[in-house]
Image (tube, coloured by chain):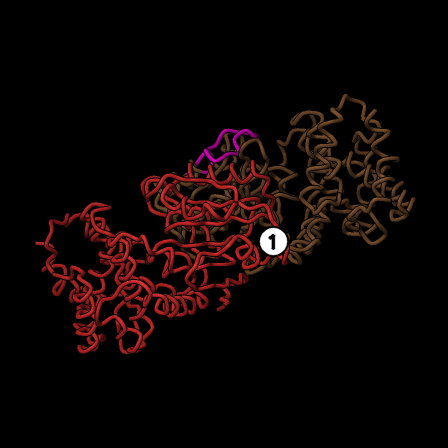
Chain colours: A red, B brown
Amino acid sequence: MPVYKFGDHPCSVSIRRSPPRREELYAGAGYPPGDKPAALLVCDTNTAPLGRDMDIPRCVLPPGEDAKNWGSVEAIIRTAQSRGLGRDGLFIGLGGGVVCDLTAFAASVYMRGAALALVPTTLLCMVDACLGGKTGFDLGGIKNLAGTFYPAGFIAIASDLLRTLPPAEWKSGTAELIKTAILSGDRDFLGQFTRPFRGEPFLPLIERALIVKGRIVESDPQETGTERALLNLGHTFGHALEAALGLGLISHGEAVAWGIARACELGKELGITPPALEEQILGILHAWDYETALPYPRRINPGVFREALGSDKKKRGGKLRFVVPCAGGARLLALDSSMEKILEKTLLKRLLP
Amino acid sequence: MPVYKFGDHPCSVSIRRSPPRREELYAGAGYPPGDKPAALLVCDTNTAPLGRDMDIPRCVLPPGEDAKNWGSVEAIIRTAQSRGLGRDGLFIGLGGGVVCDLTAFAASVYMRGAALALVPTTLLCMVDACLGGKTGFDLGGIKNLAGTFYPAGFIAIASDLLRTLPPAEWKSGTAELIKTAILSGDRDFLGQFTRPFRGEPFLPLIERALIVKGRIVESDPQETGTERALLNLGHTFGHALEAALGLGLISHGEAVAWGIARACELGKELGITPPALEEQILGILHAWDYETALPYPRRINPGVFREALGSDKKKRGGKLRFVVPCAGGARLLALDSSMEKILEKTLLKRLLP
């Protein structure tokens, strides 16, 4: 079982088929054998049935991104308190990114920090959100305006939980998986995605992706350096697309896939992404049926798109930051004015009429 | 200027007469000379006039413990966002414990952690709350149920701000100062309190107290060990008294002073507190006009008192923990059954009819 170390926080990850039993969660989170801590299982109405056998007091949230707010955090904290959790209590998140982010935030502030285990139930959460310690919720219409860095002590990845995953969720998670394979710089890993597949073969690839992400996060646990920014490959344009289409119209993964295609184009134009690598990546995105066309085939709001790019720029000392694929994985660029002109000419002019 | 290191977080403390100017806050918090970060000054209606000259956008909260809730945190976060603070923005708390704890919590979760400077305006906050990284707010009637460990990067202690401090606030802060002098094990430090005084002579004593507290917190920044528990000298009985009298009837400091007297009695009975030390401490508490009588001269609720002691016990694996003065400072005891009998006989029987 691999153990990561994010700052002072060890995080062990178990990857297997069947969901964990209660005792396994306790042991994974570091309680001595036989110990039965006060625990709270947090899920949403979709994932509640998956936790029925665990026999742990529950807090059931409404499903979806709309629930990612303070009201949900407060419900978790109040339920934990009424169930007798002390600072030595255990919070367990069973669900996708929203449930895991909320549970982790609540655990991070409960009596200034309680134990945390996560059982992700979506592919996207398994390959990305569950690992790395980012917690948070939305406030004033801004995603994750409030949050903490608080890695789970234990993550249990159980592929059986994916059996009932809807096709759109597979598509969303696979894009992050392909992104991580690109970041690894490992052509064999990336090559696994040449032809699409479903189900069991994902398990070893999730494992490889977590090792890649784990190494990146270990080198920059609180995003004070630039290493962690590599994980934003495909996200600069992807986020802008999500915003310009109107949130919720396409999945996060579809937006990221489209953004990866843009990163390849820009990288090739700047002489950083080898043409053969660009071809391989675009081939994979097509094989998995992602929309990569430029201009985008649906109406996008040009003002919102530029605004979304610009707000990122404002945050970063006036330079737009862009991650592009390269021979060894990916590279973070802070665009100078000549690079920005190339971005304008090769991408923005064709995208925004 | 002393610099503490709490885990990965450096914290520098400036102790002086006059309140800091804006540029000094920026420099203290680590911004390069000439840099003018987006900043937010958080105060309450009492401390707002003290910050008028700083020329920094403000968030003004209602005064008092009632404001220590999520609504205040949300107001701080929303104001920060509307004022353009990014993750590289600066939060400045100007006030007593409530304002500083709320500002520090908001900074700790704002975009997963922004810069923080504190300018305490009460003696209690100067000698205790501002240093050590504990942040938090009340929820469901429970004090600091939600919080984080997030030390300020810079603390400016300005004695001029104490000029308008009400007498009750002096009394509350002095008790924590005397407590810290006991913990130091330095008889000269403790001896400074033999006769009461006011004003300027406090400044060097605040400095000494922060060095003592700083060392304790450095050795146990997130309260995972037992070192930090020493800071609870006087608090086990003090908190129970506050609860049993009804919150707000006496100040925190008065309750702590009464609790220190109890800790001395128990320590002497157990052969840990030297009688001469007990006599010195009780003499000081009398000189400063603290109530130390057993039984307590006002009606206290025995059920609530025992419940408050017991809830602490439940949290700590079934044993009541008690800090008692000793020759070198203070010692943390986990009471075994024979010690509990002594506690019952010498203190509780006389206190609760």
Going 22% across and 57% down the picture, which residue do you hit?
Answer: A254
- Compared with A329, B91 (above or below) is above
Residue A202 shows in the view: yes
Under mark 1, the amino acid is Gln
Check residue B204 for magenta coloring.
Answer: no
- Quadrant assignment, res A279: bottom left
Up the image or down, A281 lies above or below B53; here it is: below
- For the residue pair B349 and A300, the one nearer the viewer reads as B349
In the displayed image of the protein, which residue is found farthest to the top?
B299
Q: Position of residue B107 (x, y in %)?
A: 47, 47
Residues in magenta?
Answer: B58-73
Mark 1 falls within which chain? B
Q: Report x, y in % for residue B185.
A: 80, 52
Query: Residue B151 versus residue B349: which sits nearer the camera?
Result: B349
| Residue B126 horizontal side relative to residue A136, left or right | right
Answer whether residue B53 is visible to the viewer in this image. no
Residue placed under numbered mark 1 in the picture: B222
Tell me the quarter of the image containing the C terminus of chain B: top right
Instruction: Using the rendered view, name the quadrant where residue B192 is placed.
Output: top right
- Classify 10 Å Cα crowding around label 1: few (below 14), some (14-19), many (20 and above): some
Q: Quadrant of the N terminus of chain B?
A: bottom right
The answer to whether residue B70 is magenta is yes
Residue B31 coordinates in the image, percent (x, y): 45, 56
Query: What residue lies at 29% left-to-right and 55% top-to-bottom?
Result: A312
Closer to us: A271 or A7: A7
